[in-house]
Amino acid sequence: MFFNEIFVYQFASRNSHVGKKKIGYSSVSRELTECGSCLDDSSNDVQCSAQREDKSCTFVCVPMVDGTPGPIPQEHYGSPWESSGSRSKRVITILVLAFIFMAAGFLIRIDIFPKFHQRLQREEHLTFDIVGNNAILRSQPLLYRSSFHFQPPKNWMNDPNGPMYYKGFYHIFYQYNPGGAVWGNLTWGHAVSRDLVHWRDLEPALKPDQWYDNGGVWSGSVTICPDGSPIILYTGVADDLEQSQNIAVPEDLSDPFLRRWVKNPENPVLRHPVGIDKEDFRDPTTAWQVDDGSWRILIGAKMERDGMALLYKSRDLRHWELDENVLHTVPDSGMWECLDFFPIAPFGREAFDTSINGPNVKHVLKVSFFDDKHDHYAVGTYNLSTESFSPINPALDIQHGLHYDYGKFYASKSFYDPVKKRRIVWGWSNESDSEAQDIAKGWASLQAIPRSLWLDTALGDNLIQAPVEEVDGLRGSKVSQTYVNMEAGSVVKIDGSSGGQLDIEVTFEYPYISKTLTIEDNGHQNEPFDCGNGGSAQRGLYGPFGLLVLTDDAFQEQTAVFFYISQDTDHHWVTHFCSDQSRSSLLPDLDTTVFWSDVRVLPTENFLSLRVLVDHSIVESFVQGGRMAITSRVYPKEAVDDQAHVFLFNNGTTPIKVRSINVWQMQSINVIPLV
């Protein structure tokens, strides 16, 4: 089950006598000594409401993020359920529903509708909604929905916005279309969590309701002010497509959920400067404070074909002026959007608050390239006197250097977690199926697993990314194998690793390669490697070797994540990593692009490590301890649930040794929908 049902407790009271109806979860029993007043649990773990209705009192609770109950509005349930004559109506309704279910079960059992039966078992999930006194049987397509990645209950989502921690809760905002499973009508969706794993979906935080954002409330950031209050800076799009920067603040700072936000009456606070087109000015970063107390933000832009990070200054986070310096620009790089800029510690995993700077502090500039839909980044230094950013390694500058992820991962946004002193990044993972299929599913896109970021001190110019440690708490049963010798052309099934919710860790011994050996010496052509030219079906001296996930026993469908070691034109050995979804599904109309990149392996590293998170339609691979990552979206038809297996494979001509492989079954998370 991918989403917990809503559980509603209803209490009918007359003359202080409380009767209760339970629908799931353990019941909460209380005496209502006075109708018409709101009952609040002093621990805030349970929030309740009481409403007088014709001498009766109704008490309603639903689970909070941590599994305890919380409030739902009175207007979402109907009074007939609480009326004194409702008992007979309920009995009749239950009997009718029972008859319908038995009849449907009989029809299914005798296979009058085999296609419906198959879809019911594999693609639909039956839930009860108590809405206006009617028990509605609702089918929800779940075959490709994630089990432990965050996504709203329905409709379209894209960029993560303004992640933060506030009063005991992690918040994630995101681009959301409340009206359908396609891009458009963009608002800021909103969810909260105590642990970055289990979530409660809330009302949209920002809606397009002003002249400057009628065309959409686009991406932005949250800055925590010195007094601890948050402020949103976001891009609004007007009807004429002009992009401007705007501010919103919480209506009630005492509410840890921050359910309601108020837009600044002075909006827009920033409009596009001279020389920048009105449609190329968006996505303000989290603000940072400098020594004199003033603030800085970056806004993505382009001038002709030159992408750039415009720098703005402010004294109060509300009135901004364009600095004469552009923080950084790269010629012919196209539009820069969803910028991120933050300090990184020179060693260790402990992160810095966004405003930290100093002689030993390095900074990361991340840019989402509109042209290629990838997140590029560079590690460098921030010079406050010249208000400029310089990469440590010019060869790894923005555009020409490193990606956060070489697959379906875009528009990422990071934040500083003050609880565990870490930098966490979110990224949007788009679909690879068609828009028509998304409409049929009723939802599109999800958020990749939140990742911790820190500097790869072995290289100094590279980041390490790893799933946040809380994800490990979802691990269930485990199977392991050690010291597996993979002969050339071999495939080994990992027994006990079936299913669509897995966490896999595997370590290979790096093959012994003579410094004098060349590919020509072994009868192989020395051609530049391209993972897209044959994918895992290629055959070389060292690889492909790796994993087949979401694979059926007949190998009709297989998603291969693998290493391939080859020589470049200068006879240097290069290690590549690929995610090949070209044979991942028998279904038509899918984007089956093969993603790959080189992996930087140090001479002291005699191993290749790989961690893969498999969650039905998303496969996230973290290579060499998180030195690089690739996210793929796949939609197998046959290799689902118990028919999806994990295999080790070696398609190279040289034996490969596997030091160890561990496969955990992953539990589903709770995402409590808004009622």
Image (tube, grey):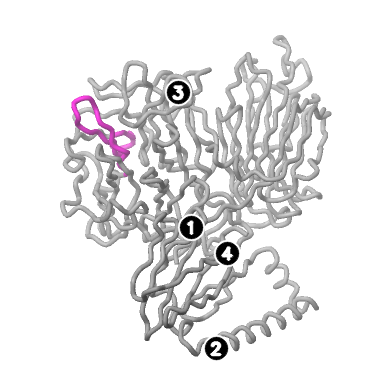
Do residues under tags 4 and 1 come within 8 Å of each other at their CB atoms? no
Q: Residue at x 45, y 55 (%)?
A: 157
Dot 3 crowding, Cα within 10 Å, few <14, some 14–19, many 20+: some
Residue 371 lies, with reference to residue 191, above or below; the image says: above
Per the image, the residue denoted by label 1 is 152
- Between discs 4 and 1, the one toward the N terminus: 4
Of 330 and 664, the residue lying toward us: 664
Per the image, the residue denoted by label 3 is 396
- For the residue marked with disc 1, what is the amino acid? Pro
Per the image, the residue denoted by label 2 is 89
Magenta-tinted stretch = 283-309
Regarding residue 126, the answer to whether it shows in the image is: yes
Do residues under tags 1 and 2 come within 8 Å of each other at their CB atoms? no
The x and y percentages for residue 344 are: 40, 26
The x and y percentages for residue 84 are: 48, 88
Dot 1 crowding, Cα within 10 Å, few <14, some 14–19, many 20+: many
Q: Is residue 339 left or right of residue 197?
A: left
Label 1: which secondary element? loop
- Between discs 4 and 2, the one toward the N terminus: 4
Residue 565 lies, with reference to residue 304, above or below; the image says: above
Asked whether 305 falls inside the magenta stretch, the response is yes
Per the image, the residue denoted by label 4 is 25
Dot 4 crowding, Cα within 10 Å, few <14, some 14–19, many 20+: some
Q: Residue at x 38, y 84 (%)?
A: 55
Q: Residue at x 45, y 20 (%)?
A: 395
- For the residue marked with disc 3, what is the amino acid? Leu
As drawn, the residue found furthest toward the top would be 516
Task: Tell me which corner region of the image, top left, top right, bottom left or bottom right, holds residue 425.
Answer: top left
- Between discs 1 and 2, the one toward the N terminus: 2
Do residues under tags 1 and 3 come within 8 Å of each other at their CB atoms? no
- Between discs 3 and 2, the one toward the N terminus: 2
